[in-house]
Image (spheres, rainbow, N blue to C red):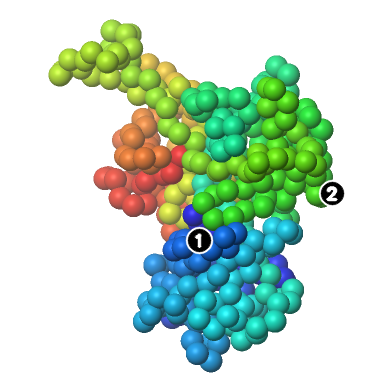
């Protein structure tokens, strides 16, 4: 599970790219602020975890309480006892010394045995924002009902597009956007725009287990025979918990004769790939999400917030890429992309792995994320910068 950890001042736990320093000087959730949480053992409601940075270095505590990144000499040096508090905040207690991880608003250290507000860390999920919500209590997935403007927890398999959601984090709260661009709200019906009525606290524990509460502490969980997702105060048997999973990439395979593949297939078939549960993609590359920025005219590849692009399937495996404003992606002479094109261009999508794809632009080159933040079409072969999580 990938997370960011926010301290009492609002700063993110940050592992520096050069050296082994650790601070809380990060102001947003970027690569240096993303940590992998590895659970080693469970101790009742607590977990023993290792916290690993973006370069594979562990968060380590020395005998004098200093904190840095590196490879542990002993397992206990990198192990923390994680406790989830009723507020949703976490504490990380170094297993050997029993001292708590804390910050002074700049530096990070581990010297205190007594618990104070300076030892509380608010977790923020750093997984891909396009997800499905699985309820372990009912063994069912959440599903948007566009006709009734509600969300039910009644889908045994998340093959429908209505089972997908976007997680949008703003000012420490989470807004849950549905596949039809509406938002789960405190009222039972969906809201058209994000607001205080759609803002929830995301309470997180290891294993991508979450539950959502509003500002007054009411819990969002499935209720009634049909499993209507709404606020309440008395969930039973852990029915408020959801597992956040990556949105699955269901596809249908269609031959050139316009017939769909069955369990009987020949050795020389050619197939056209078509997504069956996606009308849009959320692309995340090496440097962040792909999308429009108010500061730049061209499409960027280093955004912190997801910006969905609609995909319009055409013949022979071709897709047109359309911004939410209904304009098309257009290619400039500099091989960059503008989101304001009037005419549709042809793109090809190549599946490269689990939730990974490469995109061939109209000029025949692969889309590549540039280190400076611009999306360009100049990749001659599929490299790390040409792969996109979706």
- Residue that lies at the very extreme toward the bottom in this rendered image: 64
Specify few, some or many for label 2: CA neighbours under 10 Å numbering under 14, 14-19, or 20 or more: few
Residue 209 or 305: which is nearer the viewer? 209
Q: In this view, does 316 lie above or below 244?
A: above
* 2 left or right of 214 in image: left
Decide if residue 55 is on the left or right side of residue 203. left
Q: Residue at x 62, y 78 (%)?
A: 100
Point 75% across, 43% down: residue: 219
Among numbered discs 2 and 1, the one appearing first in the sequence: 1
Q: Which is more foreground, mark 2 or mark 1?
A: 1
Residue named by callout 1: 42
For the residue labelled by badge 2, is the local secondary structure a helix, a strand or a loop?
Answer: loop
User: Could you tell me if residue 380 is visible in this image?
Assistant: yes
The correct choice, above or below, for 165 with respect to 3 in the image is above
Q: Nearer the viewer, residue 227 or 336?
A: 227
The secondary structure type at the circle numbered 1 is: strand
Residue 6 x/y as whole percent: 65, 66
Q: Are marks 2 and 1 in contact (CB under 8 Å)?
A: no
Q: Position of residue 277 (x, y in %)?
A: 49, 25
Q: Which residue is labeled 2 in the image?
A: 216
Q: In this view, does 163 lie above or below 284?
A: above
Of residues 169 and 7, which is closer to you in this image? 7
Q: Residues within 10 Å of mark 1 (few under 14, many from 20)?
A: few
In the rendered image, the residue lying farthest to the right is 216
Q: Vertically, is 4 above or below 246?
A: below
Q: Residue at x 36, y 40 (%)?
A: 354
Q: Residue 80, percent across and down?
A: 52, 72
Direction left: furthest residue: 267
Is any part of residue 293 visible from this angle? no
Locate residue 361, reporting x and y percent: 38, 35
* 3D distance between C-alphas at marks 2 and 1: 31 Å
Q: In which quarter of the image is residue 269?
A: top left
């Amino acid at each position: 599970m990938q997370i960011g950890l926010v301290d009492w001042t609002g700063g993110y736990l940050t592992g520096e790219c050069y050296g082994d320093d650790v601070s809380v000087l990060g102001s947003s959730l970027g690569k240096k602020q993303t940590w992998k949480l590895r659970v080693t053992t469970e101790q009742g409601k607590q977990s023993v975890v290792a916290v690993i940075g973006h370069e594979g270095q562990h968060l380590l505590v020395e005998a004098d309480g200093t904190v840095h990144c590196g490879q542990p000499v002993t397992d206990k040096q990198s192990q923390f006892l994680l406790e989830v508090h009723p507020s949703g905040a976490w504490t990380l207690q170094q297993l050997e010394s029993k001292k708590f991880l804390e910050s002074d608003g700049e530096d990070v250290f581990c010297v205190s045995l007594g618990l104070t507000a300076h030892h509380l860390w608010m977790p923020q999920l750093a997984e891909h924002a396009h997800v499905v919500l699985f309820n372990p209590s009912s063994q069912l997935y959440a599903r948007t009902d566009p006709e009734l403007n509600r969300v039910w927890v009644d889908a045994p398999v998340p093959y429908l597009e209505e089972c997908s959601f976007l997680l949008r984090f703003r000012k420490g709260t989470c807004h849950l956007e549905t596949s039809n661009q509406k938002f789960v709200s405190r009222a039972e019906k969906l809201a058209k725009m994000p607001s205080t009525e759609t803002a929830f606290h995301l309470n997180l524990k290891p294993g991508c287990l979450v539950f959502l509460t509003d500002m007054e502490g009411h819990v969002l969980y499935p209720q009634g025979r049909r499993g209507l997702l709404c606020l309440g105060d008395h969930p039973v048997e852990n029915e408020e918990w959801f597992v956040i999973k990556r949105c699955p990439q269901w596809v249908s395979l269609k031959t050139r004769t316009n017939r769909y593949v069955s369990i009987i297939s020949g050795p020389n078939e050619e197939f056209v790939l078509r997504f069956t549960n996606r009308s849009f993609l959320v692309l995340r590359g090496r440097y962040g999400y792909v999308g429009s920025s108010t500061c730049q005219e061209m499409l960027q590849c280093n955004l912190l917030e997801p910006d969905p692009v609609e995909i319009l399937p055409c013949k022979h495996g071709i897709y047109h890429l359309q911004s939410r404003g209904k304009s098309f992606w257009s290619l400039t002479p500099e091989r960059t992309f503008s989101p304001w094109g009037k005419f549709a261009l042809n793109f090809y999508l190549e599946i490269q792995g689990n939730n990974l794809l490469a995109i061939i632009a109209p000029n025949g080159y692969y889309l590549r994320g540039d280190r400076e933040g611009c999306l360009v079409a100049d990749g001659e072969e599929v490299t790390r910068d040409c792969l996109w999580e979706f």
